[in-house]
Image (cartoon, rainbow, N blue to C red):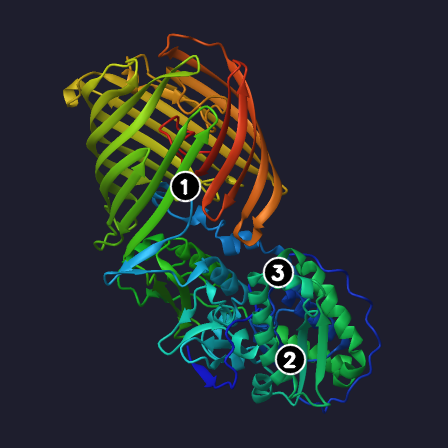
Amino acid sequence: MLFKTTRTGLAALAAGCLFTCATGLAADPEPAQPYAVATSDRPRIGLVLAGGGAKGGAHVGVLKVLEEMRVPIDCIAGTSMGALVGAGYASGIPANALQEFLVEIDWKSVVGGLGQRDLQPIEQKRAGVTYSNNFELGLKDKRVVVPGGIVNTSGIEDLLRTYVARARMQSSFDRLPIPFRAVATDMITGEMVVLDKGDLATAMRASMAIPGAFAPVVTDEYILADGGMVRNIPVDVARELCADVVIVVNLVEPSAQREKLQSATQLLSRSTDVMLQANETLQLRTLTERDVRIDVAMGDIGTADFERVPDTIPLGEAATRAAADRLARLAVPEPEYLAWRQKVTASQVIEARLADVRYEGLERVNPAYLEQQAQVRPGDTVDTAEISAEAQRMSALQEFESVEYRLVGDPAHPTLVWLPKEKQVGPDYLKFDLGMYASEGGDIAFALYAKHHRAWLNTLGAEWRNEVQLGSENLLATSLYQPLDASHRFFVEPRLMWSRNWEYVFLDGERLARYRLSDFGGSLDTGINLNNRSQLRVGYLYTRRDVDVNTGSPLMPEGERDDAGLSASFTFDSRDTPFNATRGGAAALEYFRSDDSLGADSDWERIELGLGLALPVRNDVIWMTLAGGSNLDSDLPADRTFRIGGPGSFPGFELGELRSDEYWTASGSYLWKIKDILSIRGQALYAGLRLQAGQTYERLDQIDEDTMYGGSVYVTGRTMVGPLTVGVGATSTDSYSVWLAIGRPIGHGTILERGIFR
C-alpha cells in the first residue's frame, strides 16, 4: 500500500472518532423539494465527512438529501466513520443501499467475534472450550507481547472487505467511481497520512483504528491509527484532491454540562473531546463563502451509542434540508444528474476466471494447509462476495491478525494473491483464567489456570500444549497435537498429566467425608475432524489413582488403583460462545472401558452423553439440556461413579452431592435480557428461570430415588472476566442450594458441569 503524507501542526493525543457503524432504520425521507438548479458549467464538489462513531450515521442522511437535490459529488475525503460511509458512496453504493447495509449489520458478531466461532476448526473449539475469557498474550524473542488492541478486528475487516468488495479491484482510489481519500494517523511521528492507494478496506480499517481498542494497521513505513487525532474534518485533503467547493458535514455535540464533569473519567473523556474540537476548528476556519457547512446537532447521542444510530440518520436529513438554500446552487438538471448517477453506480462485475491462487508472506503457517481449507480455487469464476467469504473463513482459523488479498495479472484470467498477516504475538501463546464457586451449603472452590501452547512446530501444524491449574483443583499436563495431513483432518495426540482434587461424599445432604484423589497417567488419542463442528477420537488411557480419605468416615475404598483401557469420544459444537451461548448447539459423548488385559486392576466401563441447545428469541434465549450416564452393567469403582448436582446438572443440590452408577437429567431455561453490559461485545446480563427433572440409579448411599423435579432462578451474564452466575435452586426432595459461580467451571461433576451449558 502506498500513502501520501502531510505534517500537521497539531499534536492531538486522542480522538472521539469512529468505533464502527451500527444498526437501525431511518425514517422515510420527506418528499423531494423543487430546488433551484445550477448550470452544467459547475465547480467540482468535494464532500468532507467527519469522524464521530455512532454519530456518523448522520452522514447517510446527508447523502440521501443530496441525492434528492441532485447534487453530484466529484470527490470525497473522510475520517473514521466518515471514511467508512465515504468509501461506500465513492464505490458506487447509493445512500438508500448504505442505510440498508448499516441496518442489517450484527455488530455483536462483527466486533465481538461471536459470529466467527462457528467457522473455527473443531479442534480449536474443543481445546479452548473451557476458557472463560478471550484475552491472550504472546511470547516472542523471550519477551511477553500484548496484542495491539482489546477488540478482535478480524470481523470488522471481513465486513469492510464485503462492503467494498467490487471497488477493491482498483489499486488507486482515483479510479473509484468517485475519487476518495481516507485519513489516518502515523503513531510513530504523529503525522497525518492520506491514504490514496492500495486496498480500500485496509485504508478504511486504518482510519478507524482507535488506539487501545483496535490494533493499528502496520506497514513497512507506518503504524496507522485513527485519523481523527490529527484531522477529524479533512477539508484540506478534499481541496487538494479535487474540490473547488467543499460540502462539510460537521457532527456537533452540545457543550458539556458542569454536573457531568465531576469525576476523573468524565474529565478525561471531555479532554479528548476538547482536543478533537481543536483540530476541527482549524479546518473549519478555512471555509469560504462558496463552501457549504452542514452542522448536524447530535443532541445527547454519543460516539458509542450504537443502538441509537437509527436516530442519527433523520438528524442528518434535517440538517441538510436546513442548508437547502446554500446547496441549491450546486444542483444540476435532472438529465445531467442521472447521467452522473449512472456513471457512478455502473456495474463493476468482472467476467473472469481465476488462473491461479497464491499465498504470500507466510513464515510459520504452511500454505498447503490453507489450500486444503480453501473453497475458492483456480478455474472458479471471480466472485468478490465469495472471495470475501473465503477471507472470513481464513480469519476464523485464528492464525492471522488480518487477511488481505489482491487480483493481479490478466483481467480476464487474474491470479488471486492472498496476503495473510501472521500474528505478531506468536508463535508461543499464553492464556490465563480463573474459576470460583461458592454455595450457601459450604462449597467453596477456587482455581487459577494458565495454558501455554506453541503453534506450527512443523509443516503439518503440530501444536505443543501445556496446562497448569492451582487451587481446589490442581493439574499439570502436557500434550502434542500432531495433524497427519495438510488438511488437519486426521491427527494423533499423546498426553501426560498429573492432578490432585478434593471431593466430598454426602449422605442426606450432609458431608460425611472429604477425599483426596490423585491421578497420574497418560493417553494416546487418534481421531478425525469430520468438519468444523464435529470430531471423533479413540485412544488408550492409563491412570494410576490414589484415593485417600482426608476427613470424616471412610465411605469409599482407599488406596492405589490402575485404570487402563480404551477410550472414545465424540464432540459437536456450533455455539456462538462456550459460555452463556445465545445460539447454536453442543454435544459430547464420552466412553471408557477399563480392561485388565490392557493394564487395569479391574474391568469396568462407563458412558456419558450431554446435549445442549440455545435458541434466540428476540433479545432473550432459551436453553435446553439433556444428559445421562451409565455403567453398562459393570461394577464402577466408588470414586468413578457419576457425580450429580450443581448449577449445570441439578441446581437444587451441592456440587457432586449425589453419586450413582447411572443417571439422567433434562432441563429447560428461559433467559430474559436485563441489560447490555457492553452490547458491541455481546456482553449482557440475563435473568433466568430453569425447570429440571432427573433420576439417579444405584446410588453410593444405597438410596434409589424416584424421578426428581426442581427449578432455579438466577442472574447470569458474560463479563470481561468471564461468565458470572448467582442463583438459588430447589428440588422435590426438599433440598436447596444458593450459589455463586465466576469464570471457568469448577468441579469434576457431570458432563454438563464441565461446560456444555452451565
Check disc 1 and report its element: helix, strand or loop.
Answer: loop
- Observer-nearest of 155 and 742: 742
Whether 244 is drawn above or below 687: the answer is below
Q: Is residue 309 left or right of residue 376?
A: right
Q: Is residue 51 left or right of residue 202?
A: right
- Percent across and percent down for residue 485 are 25, 48
Q: Residues within 10 Å of mark 2 (few under 14, many from 20)?
A: many
Residue at (81, 71) in percent of width and height: 32
Snapshot quadrant of residue 550: top left
Whether 108 is drawn above or below 533: the answer is below
Q: Residues within 10 Å of mark 3 (few under 14, many from 20)?
A: some
Snapshot quadrant of residue 522: top left
The residue to which callout 3 is attached is 101
Q: Is residue 519 left or right of residue 277?
A: left
Marks 3 and 2, how far apart at CA: 21 Å
> Which mark sits nearer the N-terminus, 1 or 3?
3
- Percent across and percent down for residue 746 are 38, 33
Residue lying furthest right: 34
